[in-house]
Image (tube, rainbow, N blue to C red):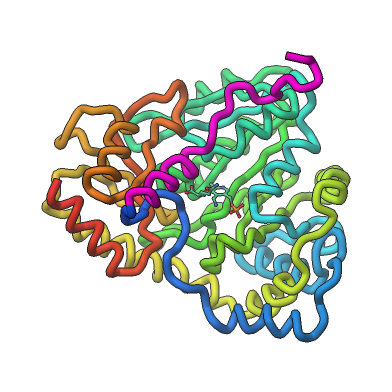
Protein backbone atom coordinates (compact mmCIF):
# COMPACT_ATOMS: atom_id res chain seq x y z
CA UNK A 1 0.00 0.00 0.00
CA UNK A 2 1.18 3.55 -0.75
CA UNK A 3 2.78 5.07 2.34
CA UNK A 4 0.36 8.00 2.32
CA UNK A 5 -2.69 5.77 2.73
CA UNK A 6 -1.20 3.40 5.32
CA UNK A 7 -3.51 3.03 8.33
CA UNK A 8 -2.45 4.74 11.55
CA UNK A 9 -4.70 2.37 13.49
CA UNK A 10 -4.33 -1.01 11.73
CA UNK A 11 -5.51 -3.04 14.72
CA UNK A 12 -8.47 -0.92 15.79
CA UNK A 13 -11.81 -2.51 14.99
CA UNK A 14 -15.38 -1.20 15.02
CA UNK A 15 -16.35 -0.42 18.62
CA UNK A 16 -18.11 -3.15 20.59
CA UNK A 17 -21.00 -0.71 21.18
CA UNK A 18 -21.63 -0.40 17.44
CA UNK A 19 -21.23 -4.14 16.80
CA UNK A 20 -23.53 -5.22 19.63
CA UNK A 21 -25.97 -2.33 19.09
CA UNK A 22 -26.37 -3.25 15.40
CA UNK A 23 -26.95 -6.91 16.26
CA UNK A 24 -29.50 -5.91 18.92
CA UNK A 25 -31.46 -3.80 16.42
CA UNK A 26 -31.28 -6.52 13.77
CA UNK A 27 -32.86 -9.00 16.22
CA UNK A 28 -35.20 -6.52 17.86
CA UNK A 29 -33.62 -7.28 21.25
CA UNK A 30 -34.12 -5.39 24.50
CA UNK A 31 -31.01 -3.25 24.55
CA UNK A 32 -29.11 -3.09 27.83
CA UNK A 33 -25.78 -2.90 25.98
CA UNK A 34 -24.63 0.65 25.14
CA UNK A 35 -24.91 3.08 28.04
CA UNK A 36 -27.81 5.43 27.34
CA UNK A 37 -31.21 6.04 28.97
CA UNK A 38 -34.36 4.93 27.14
CA UNK A 39 -36.47 7.54 28.95
CA UNK A 40 -36.79 11.22 28.09
CA UNK A 41 -34.78 14.06 29.57
CA UNK A 42 -36.49 16.87 31.50
CA UNK A 43 -38.85 18.86 29.23
CA UNK A 44 -37.72 22.05 30.99
CA UNK A 45 -34.18 21.48 29.74
CA UNK A 46 -35.46 21.02 26.19
CA UNK A 47 -37.52 24.20 26.53
CA UNK A 48 -34.43 26.07 27.64
CA UNK A 49 -32.62 24.96 24.46
CA UNK A 50 -35.55 25.96 22.31
CA UNK A 51 -35.78 29.35 24.09
CA UNK A 52 -32.08 29.93 23.54
CA UNK A 53 -32.55 29.26 19.83
CA UNK A 54 -35.54 31.60 19.62
CA UNK A 55 -33.59 34.27 21.48
CA UNK A 56 -31.02 34.14 18.72
CA UNK A 57 -28.11 32.26 20.29
CA UNK A 58 -27.51 30.46 17.04
CA UNK A 59 -24.04 31.59 16.04
CA UNK A 60 -20.62 30.50 17.27
CA UNK A 61 -20.08 30.50 21.00
CA UNK A 62 -16.81 31.67 22.53
CA UNK A 63 -13.98 29.24 21.69
CA UNK A 64 -13.61 27.75 25.22
CA UNK A 65 -17.40 27.77 25.76
CA UNK A 66 -20.14 30.22 26.75
CA UNK A 67 -18.70 32.13 29.72
CA UNK A 68 -21.92 31.87 31.77
CA UNK A 69 -21.75 28.08 31.55
CA UNK A 70 -18.07 28.00 32.49
CA UNK A 71 -18.83 30.19 35.50
CA UNK A 72 -21.60 27.87 36.64
CA UNK A 73 -19.39 24.80 36.18
CA UNK A 74 -16.67 26.50 38.20
CA UNK A 75 -19.12 27.22 41.04
CA UNK A 76 -20.39 23.64 40.99
CA UNK A 77 -16.92 22.12 41.26
CA UNK A 78 -15.91 24.53 44.00
CA UNK A 79 -19.02 23.73 46.02
CA UNK A 80 -18.73 19.96 45.61
CA UNK A 81 -14.97 19.48 45.74
CA UNK A 82 -13.55 22.68 47.28
CA UNK A 83 -11.28 23.43 44.32
CA UNK A 84 -11.53 26.66 42.35
CA UNK A 85 -11.07 26.51 38.58
CA UNK A 86 -10.98 29.93 36.95
CA UNK A 87 -13.74 30.00 34.33
CA UNK A 88 -11.62 32.20 32.05
CA UNK A 89 -8.55 29.99 31.86
CA UNK A 90 -9.28 26.61 33.46
CA UNK A 91 -12.57 25.29 32.06
CA UNK A 92 -13.42 24.37 28.46
CA UNK A 93 -16.75 23.11 27.15
CA UNK A 94 -16.36 20.17 24.78
CA UNK A 95 -18.20 17.82 22.43
CA UNK A 96 -18.90 15.29 25.17
CA UNK A 97 -16.22 13.86 27.40
CA UNK A 98 -14.89 11.98 24.38
CA UNK A 99 -13.56 15.15 22.75
CA UNK A 100 -12.11 16.35 26.05
CA UNK A 101 -10.24 13.05 26.40
CA UNK A 102 -9.04 13.04 22.80
CA UNK A 103 -7.94 16.67 22.98
CA UNK A 104 -6.01 16.28 26.24
CA UNK A 105 -4.19 13.25 24.83
CA UNK A 106 -3.44 15.00 21.51
CA UNK A 107 -2.14 18.09 23.29
CA UNK A 108 0.40 16.24 25.43
CA UNK A 109 1.27 12.79 24.10
CA UNK A 110 4.28 12.84 21.76
CA UNK A 111 5.41 9.89 19.62
CA UNK A 112 7.09 7.34 21.89
CA UNK A 113 5.50 8.66 25.08
CA UNK A 114 3.96 6.07 27.38
CA UNK A 115 0.44 6.40 28.79
CA UNK A 116 -0.71 4.18 31.66
CA UNK A 117 -4.17 2.76 31.07
CA UNK A 118 -6.03 0.78 33.73
CA UNK A 119 -7.85 -2.24 32.25
CA UNK A 120 -10.67 -3.01 31.82
CA UNK A 121 -10.85 0.39 30.13
CA UNK A 122 -13.49 2.33 28.27
CA UNK A 123 -12.66 2.06 24.60
CA UNK A 124 -11.82 5.62 23.51
CA UNK A 125 -8.49 5.98 25.34
CA UNK A 126 -6.29 3.56 23.43
CA UNK A 127 -7.01 4.74 19.85
CA UNK A 128 -6.40 8.36 20.91
CA UNK A 129 -3.02 7.40 22.37
CA UNK A 130 -2.04 5.32 19.33
CA UNK A 131 -3.06 7.84 16.68
CA UNK A 132 -0.78 10.36 18.40
CA UNK A 133 2.15 7.92 18.34
CA UNK A 134 1.93 7.14 22.06
CA UNK A 135 2.37 3.74 23.66
CA UNK A 136 -0.38 2.44 25.96
CA UNK A 137 1.07 0.69 29.02
CA UNK A 138 -1.48 -1.46 30.81
CA UNK A 139 -2.28 -2.24 34.41
CA UNK A 140 -5.00 -4.87 34.71
CA UNK A 141 -7.43 -4.79 37.64
CA UNK A 142 -7.79 -8.18 39.32
CA UNK A 143 -10.78 -10.45 38.73
CA UNK A 144 -11.81 -10.36 42.35
CA UNK A 145 -13.51 -7.02 42.97
CA UNK A 146 -11.47 -5.17 40.32
CA UNK A 147 -8.86 -4.02 42.82
CA UNK A 148 -5.71 -2.27 41.65
CA UNK A 149 -2.21 -3.55 42.35
CA UNK A 150 -0.46 -0.27 43.23
CA UNK A 151 3.00 -1.85 43.24
CA UNK A 152 2.40 -3.09 39.69
CA UNK A 153 1.28 0.37 38.67
CA UNK A 154 4.35 1.96 40.27
CA UNK A 155 6.58 -0.47 38.38
CA UNK A 156 5.08 0.62 35.06
CA UNK A 157 6.30 4.19 35.52
CA UNK A 158 9.37 4.94 33.40
CA UNK A 159 11.18 8.06 32.18
CA UNK A 160 8.87 7.92 29.15
CA UNK A 161 5.59 7.95 31.12
CA UNK A 162 3.75 11.08 30.10
CA UNK A 163 0.19 10.44 31.32
CA UNK A 164 -2.02 8.17 33.37
CA UNK A 165 -5.73 7.72 32.70
CA UNK A 166 -8.06 7.08 35.61
CA UNK A 167 -11.80 6.47 35.37
CA UNK A 168 -13.93 6.78 38.49
CA UNK A 169 -16.75 5.75 38.86
CA UNK A 170 -15.37 3.03 36.64
CA UNK A 171 -16.90 1.74 33.44
CA UNK A 172 -17.40 -1.22 33.08
CA UNK A 173 -16.79 -2.55 36.62
CA UNK A 174 -19.08 -0.08 38.43
CA UNK A 175 -16.58 0.42 41.24
CA UNK A 176 -15.43 3.77 42.55
CA UNK A 177 -11.93 4.65 43.69
CA UNK A 178 -11.88 5.40 47.41
CA UNK A 179 -10.24 8.35 49.15
CA UNK A 180 -7.41 6.06 50.31
CA UNK A 181 -6.81 4.88 46.77
CA UNK A 182 -6.73 8.45 45.44
CA UNK A 183 -4.25 9.36 48.20
CA UNK A 184 -2.08 6.38 47.26
CA UNK A 185 -2.12 7.46 43.63
CA UNK A 186 -1.26 11.01 44.68
CA UNK A 187 1.79 9.71 46.59
CA UNK A 188 2.93 7.57 43.65
CA UNK A 189 2.70 10.48 41.21
CA UNK A 190 4.21 13.11 43.55
CA UNK A 191 7.86 12.69 42.50
CA UNK A 192 6.94 12.62 38.77
CA UNK A 193 5.78 15.07 36.09
CA UNK A 194 3.08 12.72 34.89
CA UNK A 195 -0.16 14.35 33.74
CA UNK A 196 -3.39 12.69 34.81
CA UNK A 197 -6.55 12.41 32.79
CA UNK A 198 -9.43 11.72 35.15
CA UNK A 199 -12.53 10.50 33.35
CA UNK A 200 -15.37 11.30 35.77
CA UNK A 201 -18.39 11.11 33.48
CA UNK A 202 -20.38 9.14 36.11
CA UNK A 203 -19.57 11.64 38.90
CA UNK A 204 -23.27 11.98 39.83
CA UNK A 205 -24.16 8.29 39.74
CA UNK A 206 -22.86 7.05 43.09
CA UNK A 207 -24.64 4.60 45.40
CA UNK A 208 -25.12 3.63 49.03
CA UNK A 209 -24.04 6.98 50.45
CA UNK A 210 -20.55 6.81 48.98
CA UNK A 211 -18.64 9.95 47.97
CA UNK A 212 -17.28 10.68 44.51
CA UNK A 213 -13.56 11.20 45.05
CA UNK A 214 -12.86 13.57 42.19
CA UNK A 215 -9.19 14.14 41.38
CA UNK A 216 -9.96 17.82 41.96
CA UNK A 217 -10.29 17.12 45.72
CA UNK A 218 -6.61 16.15 46.03
CA UNK A 219 -4.34 19.20 45.72
CA UNK A 220 -1.30 17.45 44.29
CA UNK A 221 -3.40 15.45 41.82
CA UNK A 222 -5.47 18.48 40.83
CA UNK A 223 -2.38 20.45 39.75
CA UNK A 224 -1.56 17.77 37.17
CA UNK A 225 -5.06 16.64 36.13
CA UNK A 226 -7.63 17.12 33.39
CA UNK A 227 -11.00 16.31 34.92
CA UNK A 228 -13.42 15.27 32.16
CA UNK A 229 -17.20 15.31 32.58
CA UNK A 230 -20.31 14.63 30.49
CA UNK A 231 -23.65 16.46 30.49
CA UNK A 232 -24.93 13.61 28.33
CA UNK A 233 -24.63 11.19 31.25
CA UNK A 234 -25.86 13.58 33.93
CA UNK A 235 -28.92 14.98 32.15
CA UNK A 236 -30.03 11.91 30.13
CA UNK A 237 -29.01 13.49 26.81
CA UNK A 238 -26.14 11.35 25.50
CA UNK A 239 -27.13 12.35 21.95
CA UNK A 240 -26.35 16.00 22.60
CA UNK A 241 -22.66 15.19 23.02
CA UNK A 242 -21.92 17.92 25.55
CA UNK A 243 -19.20 17.79 28.17
CA UNK A 244 -16.42 19.80 29.71
CA UNK A 245 -12.96 19.65 31.04
CA UNK A 246 -11.29 21.40 33.99
CA UNK A 247 -7.53 21.71 34.49
CA UNK A 248 -4.94 24.18 35.79
CA UNK A 249 -4.31 27.12 33.44
CA UNK A 250 -0.92 25.97 32.14
CA UNK A 251 -2.39 22.61 31.06
CA UNK A 252 -5.58 24.17 29.71
CA UNK A 253 -3.57 26.61 27.59
CA UNK A 254 -2.11 23.70 25.62
CA UNK A 255 -5.47 21.90 25.52
CA UNK A 256 -7.09 24.92 23.89
CA UNK A 257 -4.43 25.10 21.19
CA UNK A 258 -5.77 21.76 19.93
CA UNK A 259 -9.42 22.44 20.81
CA UNK A 260 -9.63 25.66 18.82
CA UNK A 261 -8.56 23.96 15.60
CA UNK A 262 -10.33 20.63 16.13
CA UNK A 263 -13.80 22.05 16.86
CA UNK A 264 -13.28 25.75 17.72
CA UNK A 265 -16.42 25.83 19.86
CA UNK A 266 -19.43 23.65 20.66
CA UNK A 267 -23.21 23.96 20.29
CA UNK A 268 -24.19 27.45 21.47
CA UNK A 269 -27.95 27.21 22.33
CA UNK A 270 -27.37 24.02 24.32
CA UNK A 271 -24.64 25.76 26.32
CA UNK A 272 -27.01 28.63 27.13
CA UNK A 273 -29.64 26.14 28.29
CA UNK A 274 -27.20 24.11 30.38
CA UNK A 275 -25.92 27.27 32.09
CA UNK A 276 -29.44 27.94 33.38
CA UNK A 277 -30.36 24.34 34.11
CA UNK A 278 -27.17 23.71 36.07
CA UNK A 279 -28.00 26.52 38.48
CA UNK A 280 -30.49 24.21 40.22
CA UNK A 281 -28.21 21.72 41.98
CA UNK A 282 -31.08 19.33 42.53
CA UNK A 283 -30.89 18.57 38.81
CA UNK A 284 -27.67 16.65 39.40
CA UNK A 285 -27.70 15.88 43.14
CA UNK A 286 -30.94 13.88 42.79
CA UNK A 287 -29.31 11.52 40.30
CA UNK A 288 -27.69 9.19 42.85
CA UNK A 289 -31.06 8.26 44.38
CA UNK A 290 -32.75 8.11 40.97
CA UNK A 291 -30.27 5.55 39.63
CA UNK A 292 -29.86 3.67 42.91
CA UNK A 293 -33.57 2.86 42.70
CA UNK A 294 -33.04 1.42 39.23
CA UNK A 295 -29.98 -0.55 40.32
CA UNK A 296 -31.88 -2.00 43.28
CA UNK A 297 -34.89 -2.85 41.15
CA UNK A 298 -32.64 -4.69 38.71
CA UNK A 299 -30.69 -6.54 41.40
CA UNK A 300 -33.75 -7.48 43.48
CA UNK A 301 -35.19 -8.97 40.34
CA UNK A 302 -32.11 -11.15 39.98
CA UNK A 303 -32.09 -12.49 43.56
CA UNK A 304 -33.18 -15.99 42.56
CA UNK A 305 -31.46 -16.11 39.17
CA UNK A 306 -28.29 -18.09 38.42
CA UNK A 307 -26.17 -14.94 38.11
CA UNK A 308 -23.59 -13.88 40.70
CA UNK A 309 -22.86 -10.20 41.28
CA UNK A 310 -21.72 -7.57 43.70
CA UNK A 311 -23.83 -4.42 43.55
CA UNK A 312 -22.46 -1.66 41.37
CA UNK A 313 -21.00 1.19 43.51
CA UNK A 314 -21.48 3.80 40.80
CA UNK A 315 -22.22 4.28 37.03
CA UNK A 316 -25.39 2.87 35.46
CA UNK A 317 -23.83 -0.48 34.71
CA UNK A 318 -24.08 -3.80 36.53
CA UNK A 319 -21.75 -6.71 35.89
CA UNK A 320 -23.23 -10.20 36.09
CA UNK A 321 -21.06 -13.30 36.48
CA UNK A 322 -22.58 -16.17 34.52
CA UNK A 323 -20.28 -19.06 35.55
CA UNK A 324 -23.20 -20.94 37.17
CA UNK A 325 -24.89 -20.92 33.80
CA UNK A 326 -22.28 -21.76 31.18
CA UNK A 327 -18.52 -21.69 30.51
CA UNK A 328 -18.83 -20.27 26.99
CA UNK A 329 -16.80 -17.14 26.07
CA UNK A 330 -18.50 -13.87 26.99
CA UNK A 331 -18.70 -12.69 23.36
CA UNK A 332 -20.44 -15.91 22.33
CA UNK A 333 -22.90 -15.66 25.20
CA UNK A 334 -23.61 -11.97 24.51
CA UNK A 335 -24.39 -12.82 20.88
CA UNK A 336 -26.47 -15.89 21.79
CA UNK A 337 -28.49 -13.81 24.28
CA UNK A 338 -29.33 -11.36 21.50
CA UNK A 339 -30.14 -13.87 18.79
CA UNK A 340 -31.93 -16.52 20.91
CA UNK A 341 -33.31 -14.55 23.85
CA UNK A 342 -33.63 -11.00 22.47
CA UNK A 343 -31.56 -9.34 25.19
CA UNK A 344 -28.40 -7.31 24.53
CA UNK A 345 -25.46 -6.77 26.92
CA UNK A 346 -21.75 -5.99 26.57
CA UNK A 347 -19.04 -8.68 26.87
CA UNK A 348 -16.32 -7.39 29.20
CA UNK A 349 -13.41 -9.18 27.51
CA UNK A 350 -13.36 -6.40 24.91
CA UNK A 351 -12.27 -3.94 27.66
CA UNK A 352 -9.69 -6.27 29.27
CA UNK A 353 -6.01 -6.73 28.59
CA UNK A 354 -5.48 -9.52 26.04
CA UNK A 355 -9.26 -10.01 26.01
CA UNK A 356 -9.17 -11.71 29.43
CA UNK A 357 -12.53 -13.42 29.71
CA UNK A 358 -13.86 -13.21 33.29
CA UNK A 359 -17.24 -14.69 32.24
CA UNK A 360 -19.12 -11.52 33.05
CA UNK A 361 -21.49 -9.40 30.99
CA UNK A 362 -22.27 -5.71 31.51
CA UNK A 363 -25.91 -4.60 31.67
CA UNK A 364 -27.02 -0.95 31.52
CA UNK A 365 -29.88 -0.26 33.93
CA UNK A 366 -30.56 3.32 32.76
CA UNK A 367 -33.88 2.09 31.43
CA UNK A 368 -37.61 2.41 32.11
CA UNK A 369 -38.88 0.00 34.74
CA UNK A 370 -40.95 -1.87 32.16
CA UNK A 371 -37.80 -2.46 30.07
CA UNK A 372 -35.91 -3.74 33.11
CA UNK A 373 -38.86 -5.99 33.96
CA UNK A 374 -38.82 -7.57 30.51
CA UNK A 375 -35.05 -8.04 30.74
CA UNK A 376 -35.39 -9.65 34.17
CA UNK A 377 -37.94 -12.14 32.86
CA UNK A 378 -35.40 -13.29 30.28
CA UNK A 379 -32.48 -13.39 32.72
CA UNK A 380 -34.49 -15.41 35.23
CA UNK A 381 -35.49 -17.95 32.59
CA UNK A 382 -31.83 -18.72 31.77
N1 LIG B 1 -15.93 7.92 29.46
C1 LIG B 1 -16.65 6.87 29.87
C2 LIG B 1 -16.13 6.01 30.96
C3 LIG B 1 -17.86 6.57 29.26
O1 LIG B 1 -18.57 5.52 29.65
C4 LIG B 1 -18.31 7.39 28.21
C5 LIG B 1 -19.58 7.02 27.51
N2 LIG B 1 -20.43 7.97 27.42
C6 LIG B 1 -17.54 8.51 27.84
C7 LIG B 1 -16.35 8.73 28.47
C8 LIG B 1 -17.95 9.44 26.75
O2 LIG B 1 -18.78 10.46 27.19
P1 LIG B 1 -19.54 11.42 26.16
O3 LIG B 1 -20.72 10.68 25.65
O4 LIG B 1 -19.89 12.63 26.94
O5 LIG B 1 -18.56 11.72 25.07
N1 LIG C 1 -20.18 5.11 27.17
C1 LIG C 1 -21.11 4.21 26.56
C2 LIG C 1 -20.96 2.83 27.19
O1 LIG C 1 -19.99 2.52 27.84
C3 LIG C 1 -20.92 4.04 25.07
C4 LIG C 1 -20.74 5.23 24.25
C5 LIG C 1 -20.30 4.82 22.86
O2 LIG C 1 -20.93 3.99 22.24
N2 LIG C 1 -19.20 5.29 22.42
O3 LIG C 1 -21.83 2.04 26.98
Task: Give the tally of numbered discs.
Answer: 0
Provide residue 79's location: percent of width, then percent of height.
Answer: 64, 68
Compared to residue 353, the image places residue 1 above or below, namely above
Q: Is residue 175 visible?
A: no
Compared to residue 99, the image places residue 112 above or below, namely above
**In the foreground, 213 or 360:** 360
Provide residue 311's location: percent of width, then percent of height.
Answer: 30, 51
Residue 328, located in which quarter of the rendered image? top left
Q: Which stretch is magenta? A: 1-27
**Is 371 placed left or right of 314 in the picture?**
left
**Is 321 placed left or right of 64 in the picture?**
left
- The quadrant the C terminus occupies is top left
**In the foreground, 127 or 199:** 127
Q: Is residue 29 visible?
A: yes
Compared to residue 181, the image places residue 84 above or below, namely below
Residue 235, located in which quarter of the rendered image? bottom right
Residue visible at 68% across and 44% down in the picture: 101
Provide residue 6's location: percent of width, then percent of height.
Answer: 73, 19
Residue visible at 54% across and 37% down in the picture: 123
Amino acid sequence: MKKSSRSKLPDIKTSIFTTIGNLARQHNAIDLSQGFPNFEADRNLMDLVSNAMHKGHNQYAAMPGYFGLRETISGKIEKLHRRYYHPESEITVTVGATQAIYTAISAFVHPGDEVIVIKPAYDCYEPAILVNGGIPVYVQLDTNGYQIDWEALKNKITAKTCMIILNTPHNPSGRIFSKEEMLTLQEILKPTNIIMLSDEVYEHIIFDGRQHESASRFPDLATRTFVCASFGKTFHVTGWKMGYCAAPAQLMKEFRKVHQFAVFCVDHPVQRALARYLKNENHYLALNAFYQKKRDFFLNGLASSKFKFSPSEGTYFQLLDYTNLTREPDEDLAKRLIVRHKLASIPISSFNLDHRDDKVLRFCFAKKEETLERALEILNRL
